[in-house]
Image (cartoon, rainbow, N blue to C red):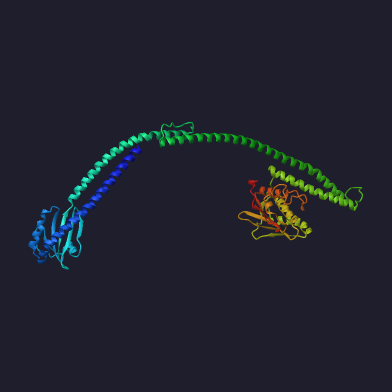
């Protein structure tokens, strides 16, 4: 239906455009012919009436323009003097007019023929000259009735042609519509069925025209879609099976990790109890508190000292393993208290000062002006974090200083920066330093001792306290560890 209307509209528009162009050309041609006719008539009047006009023989001029009545296209005529005043008019006996005629003054002031197209008429005028002197002018009015008659005829013919062409176009469009619409309807139906998920539908090809080419392409597309959907279904099934396997593997890994953490926590407790007893007995022997005991020799005292030193080292290692197990299993408890950072960190730094002095290092604590006076935090865990960071800084610094700087860090947060002048951290090792059992030097002949648990525990404790830790370092230029913590630890987040 839309195709039929479109073709009919195009035919009507085409015929109408041709008709309008024909009418326009006819109007232009008629105007040119009428102006040429008017100019020829004015030339005739000028030749016949120049002597009468020079002598101002009004009766002769009247007879001259009255003789124009035989010219059916001329409605009226005028004669003007050299100043543009009206002398005579066709069909009337007029005395000399004292009023200046606008058209007359326009004619005598022009060297060419003057034309004015008015409603259904053409007014034309031409000055008459004797030598170089203007002696007057003639004006005539011609009717355009013949033009209007011809244009009306053209319009009627155009309308007839348009109606006939529209009828023919309508018949042709209906025939074409029946030829095109049915295959298109079949294509539309097939498209809707495929959109609803029916990929088994195909289109019967009965010819070799453009619609049939489209139908073949449509059938080929349907086959490819079927293959694609089947491949996707197979892939989806495989992914579902893989997801099930991954879920099982994850559950097994989580169970193994939980068992490992539980085992480590249990073993740490079991190891720590007899170890504390060993350290206690060694301390009693070292202090000479055993009854009826002989005085120990210097070599025996040195051996006891080594027992105590290695025992404490083993106890610290067990404590690290126990803390890591609690962090990984999510059983690390947090005790929130209100404390003053100045007092808390002064005590922590003072406890580590002897280690710095033994290595000939300076250990400084700096409080910036914006440092908070009071914070809500877990005091023991904060001390453990700072102790580990200062211990690491001292261990990897041969000369220079270790500085602990405390200040605010944005709204409702504060930070502790531990800066050293030590060996620094290579760029490729920075992203792994907080991993378990990771050290910068992993060779068998490494210079610095340690298990690689310290920074992993630090990061776990900081995250437990709702904070973050970042490291800035360059090889040979020292390191800076920045701990950012909330000033008021939220009890609901721990």
Q: In this orientation, which residue lies closer to the viewer: 256 or 65?
A: 65
Q: Is residue 276 left or right of residue 253?
A: right
Work out whether residue 315 can be spotted: yes
Residue 89 placement: quadrant: bottom left
In the figure, is residue 46 to the left or right of 404?
left
Outermost residue on the bottom side: it is: 132
Residue at image coords 10%, 64%: 52
User: In the image, 59: left or right of 335?
Assistant: left
Res 139 seen here: no
Q: Position of residue 243 (x, y in %)?
A: 62, 36
Location of residue 296 in the rendering, given as x and y in whole percent from the top left corner: 90, 51
Q: Position of residue 224 (x, y in %)?
A: 51, 35
Quarter of the figure with residue 180 = top left
Left or right, residue 223 beside residue 47: right
Establish if 306 lies above or below 82: above
Residue 72 image point, x, y percent:
13, 52
Q: Is 388 above or below relative to 106? A: above
Q: Residue at x 33, y 39 (%)?
A: 5
* Foreground of the two, 92 or 20: 20
Res. 84 image quadrant: bottom left
Residue drawn 79% across the image and 58% down it: 358
Report the number of numbered marks: 0
Q: In this view, does 117 lie above or below 223?
A: below
Q: Nearer the viewer, residue 476 or 398?
A: 476
Q: Nearer the viewer, residue 95 or 322?
A: 95
Q: Can you say whether 75 is above or below 5 in the image?
A: below
């Amino acid at each position: 239906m839309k195709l039929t209307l479109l073709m009919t509209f195009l035919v009507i528009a085409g015929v109408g455009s041709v008709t309008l162009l024909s009418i326009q050309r006819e109007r232009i041609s008629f105007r040119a012919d009428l102006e040429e006719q008017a100019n020829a008539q004015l030339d005739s009047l000028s030749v016949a009436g120049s002597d009468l006009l020079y002598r101002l023989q009004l009766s002769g001029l009247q007879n001259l323009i009255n003789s124009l009545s035989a010219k059916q296209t001329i409605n009226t005529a005028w004669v003007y003097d050299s100043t543009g005043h009206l002398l005579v008019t066709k069909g009337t006996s007029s005395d000399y007019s004292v009023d200046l005629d606008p058209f007359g003054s326009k004619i005598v002031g022009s060297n060419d023929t003057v034309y004015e197209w008015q409603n259904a008429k053409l007014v034309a005028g031409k000055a008459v000259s004797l030598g170089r002197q203007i002696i007057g002018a003639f004006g005539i009015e011609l009717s355009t009735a013949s033009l209007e008659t011809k244009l009306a005829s053209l319009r009627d013919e155009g309308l007839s042609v348009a109606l006939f062409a529209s009828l023919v176009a309508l018949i042709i469009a209906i025939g074409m519509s029946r030829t095109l619409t049915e295959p298109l309807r079949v294509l539309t139906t097939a498209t809707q069925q495929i959109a609803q998920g029916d990929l088994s539908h195909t289109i019967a090809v009965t010819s070799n025209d453009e619609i049939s080419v489209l139908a073949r392409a449509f059938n080929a597309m349907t086959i490819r879609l079927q293959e694609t959907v089947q491949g996707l279904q197979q892939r989806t099934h495989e992914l579902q099976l893989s997801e099930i396997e991954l879920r099982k593997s994850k559950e097994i890994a989580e169970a193994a990790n939980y068992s490992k953490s539980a085992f480590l926590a249990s073993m740490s407790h079991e190891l720590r109890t007899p170890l504390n007893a060993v350290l206690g007995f060694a301390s009693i022997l070292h202090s000479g508190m055993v009854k009826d005991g002989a005085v120990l020799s210097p070599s025996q005292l040195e051996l006891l000292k080594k027992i105590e030193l290695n025992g404490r080292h083993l106890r610290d290692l067990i404590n690290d393993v126990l803390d890591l197990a609690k962090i990984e299993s999510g059983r690390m408890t947090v005790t929130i208290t209100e404390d003053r950072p100045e007092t808390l960190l002064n005590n922590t730094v003072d406890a580590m000062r002897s280690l710095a002095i033994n290595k000939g290092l300076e250990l400084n604590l700096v409080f910036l002006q914006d440092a908070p006076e009071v914070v809500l935090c877990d005091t023991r865990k904060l001390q453990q974090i700072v102790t580990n960071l200062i211990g690491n800084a001292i261990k990897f610094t041969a000369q220079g200083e270790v500085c602990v700087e405390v200040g605010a860090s944005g709204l409702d947060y504060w930070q502790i920066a531990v800066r050293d002048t030590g060996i620094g951290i290579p760029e490729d090792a920075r992203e792994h330093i907080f991993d378990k059992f990771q050290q910068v030097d992993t060779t068998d002949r490494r210079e610095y001792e340690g298990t690689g648990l310290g920074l992993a525990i630090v990061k776990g404790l900081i995250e437990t306290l709702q904070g973050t830790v970042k490291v800035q370092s360059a090889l040979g230029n020292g390191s800076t560890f920045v701990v950012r913590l909330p000033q008021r630890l939220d009890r609901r987040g721990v």
